[in-house]
Amino acid sequence: MVNMQSFSNALRVENTRLNNSQASLRAGQMLTGKVLELYPNQKASIQLGGSQIVAQLETALSSKQDYLFQVTSVGDLIRLKKISEAPIQNRLLSDQIMQQIGLPNNRALKAFMQQVMNQNIPFNFQEAQSIANLIEQFGGSSSNRELMQMMLQKGFPLSESVFKNLQSYQSSQLGQQISQLQQALQQPGQSQVSMANLQQQLAIFGANNRDAAMILRQFIQTNQQALQNTNQVSAQILQQMSSGNGLASTQLQDTAQQIHQVLQQQLPLSSNKMQTFQTFLNRFSQVVQQEGATDSLKHIFQQNPLFSKVMQVLSQQDKSQIQQWLQQPKSSVVQQQQTLSILQNVASQQLTQQNQNMLRTLLLHMNQVDNDTLSVRDEFLHVLKHFVNTSGIQDETRIANTLNSSNGSPANMVALMQSIKSVLPTAEQQTFQQWLQQTQPSAAQNQQITDMLHRMNVQQLPQVEQNVVRNLLTLLDTTDQPFNKEQIMQAIRQFFSQSDSSIQQLRDQDLSLKQNLIQANQQTIDFAGDRIQRLVQTITGMQINMVQDDQTLLQQNFQIPGERFGLAHDIRMQFEGKQKNETGEIDPDYCRILFHLDLNNLGETMMTLSIQKRVINITVYNDSQALKPLIDQFKPLLKQKLDGLDYQLSSVSNKLLSDSEASSAGTHSSRETYPTAPTEGIDFRV
């Protein structure tokens, strides 16, 4: 099977990552370089991979020769010393160099170090020793060497546990592991009560089975009060679904569609962004009541990225209404009221993440009872969102973000003031300090500070403080009356304290799949312990693989079980692109998406979607002769659907997966194709 990470790397411009890494060379690292030209005062021009640098040398060199260098210091001028006394002939790693860097001269280790040297990947002595230990313990197969190289390049700890987790993630099938664990947990005589939550979580990702109706009843009986608390499903409907008879097919489908529509209305906004939205609505309401002008509100709506997300969940009719409000220089009171009503309705429909997870779980259980409750496209998207939100791949990140943004204490207020002062121009820092020291600054001074905050580069602040300042600026922009110092400080304290409640919400959240697995493993379940441990390793490996130190290029890799969609293997995906300003998300106008599927009829398939300025180019890699006619058949429909999403389809091409260009690639791909019933040799319809 094609390796997705290699496939992804082969598609990138050669040396892109290497060029980025040169700026972050660290003292102690070693890498090969070619001496291009010698300069006076022990300086030289050296070719390091795809980049050329001028370095200060600590030893004599010969021009036009390759050497293994070690970085002794970095700064305005990189200082290098040579590890190999003699030049490296034809870039071949000699036994002498292996000895000089303190490594045993075994065949597998030497092959790996040669691979590292050929690709100009920096490493230090400790990393080389750790690689030697890993090869001794796990062997030097090509797949192991590739994994170790990825760990080295991404700066992951070169430890046994990290290697095992990543190896489990790359080589295992989640769907298969979940299926095997489900079977183990269903063994006679085992406690079904303590494992109920875990079994229900696993069932979501498994293939449809005859027990689907029973699992739905058990889920509702276990979570009936929590489901009622969402205020989206009536107690009567829940009672009927949890009874032996269940709902009639049409009633089940209608209920599922209602839940689906509610989930479609949910905005992907943090608590801070929701507070900004609410602040905006409060100000809008005041303006409408006073029959005032909404010019400043229109400006904020058009400039703040969160409102583009609001527009995405609106119906076409509501979008048109808001567009009319934005475009007319002087909107009527009636038009303002209609626009405010639309936005208030969106805000009122927002649910906590916990309630969203609860409803989506119910919906997916209902879909397993009756496949007609959701289209395959919608089912795929719900399974994808459910996996991201409940599998545990975001556990540590969510906890860290919540704790980091949770404290509105005086110490945090002081830290924020210091941060603001540090990013202001030198000429304004003294003015800001004097304002802080005054008990009651004048209105003119308060306005001066407000203007300074607007000119300030907010992105230079830490992320938590960015959110607070942006919320403050939104409040100041949408209020006609000037704020005094105490009101500004009170607003800051309020925005800080908004996140205090998120700590409690974090405590109240249901355990993720990974957390339930760890809890089950601690209960010494001998009959399933090994399977639980392997599944935890796979999820942890996925988490580790999502970590990155290159903040200019975001990349997210993960996989979801394919058994629910009738596939024997997992669906692997990779999303990659530049970070969108302020949101920290991948910019949907400039990105690339990879999909990797093993389809029942078409076989192994890789697909890349490259998006530039919302123009899409698609390449499908597959060895089946049946692919080309299918692409021609469905291309017009694909173009029509993308047009409806404001994307333009430029091209759809296909290549053989076995071609050298593609076969040198392939670890983490993904597809966002959506399966329909496999008829006439078609596995998935986009």
Image (cartoon, rainbow, N blue to C red):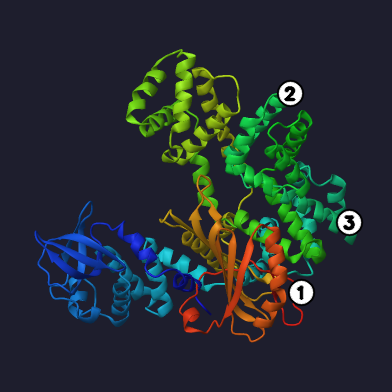
Residue labelled with disc 1: 677
Cα distance between the residues tagged 3 and 1: 23 Å
Residue labelled with disc 2: 289
Disc ID at residue 251: 3
Q: Position of residue 248 (x, y in %)?
A: 90, 59
**Sequence-first tag of 2 and 3:** 3
Say which amino acid is labelled 2: Gln
Q: Position of residue 436 (x, y in %)?
A: 41, 20
Q: Residue most toward the bottom?
A: 625
| Element at label 2 | helix
Cα distance between the residues tagged 2 and 3: 42 Å
**Sequence-first tag of 3 and 1:** 3
Cα distance between the residues tagged 2 and 1: 54 Å
| Element at label 3 | helix
Say which amino acid is labelled 3: Gln
Observer able to see residue 549: yes
Badge 1: how crowded within 10 Å, few (<14), some, or many (20+)? few
Say which amino acid is labelled 1: Ala
Relative vertical location of residue 515 with respect to residue 120 in this rendering, above or below:
above
Residue at image location 74% in from the left, 71% down from the top: 676
**Sequence-first tag of 2 and 1:** 2
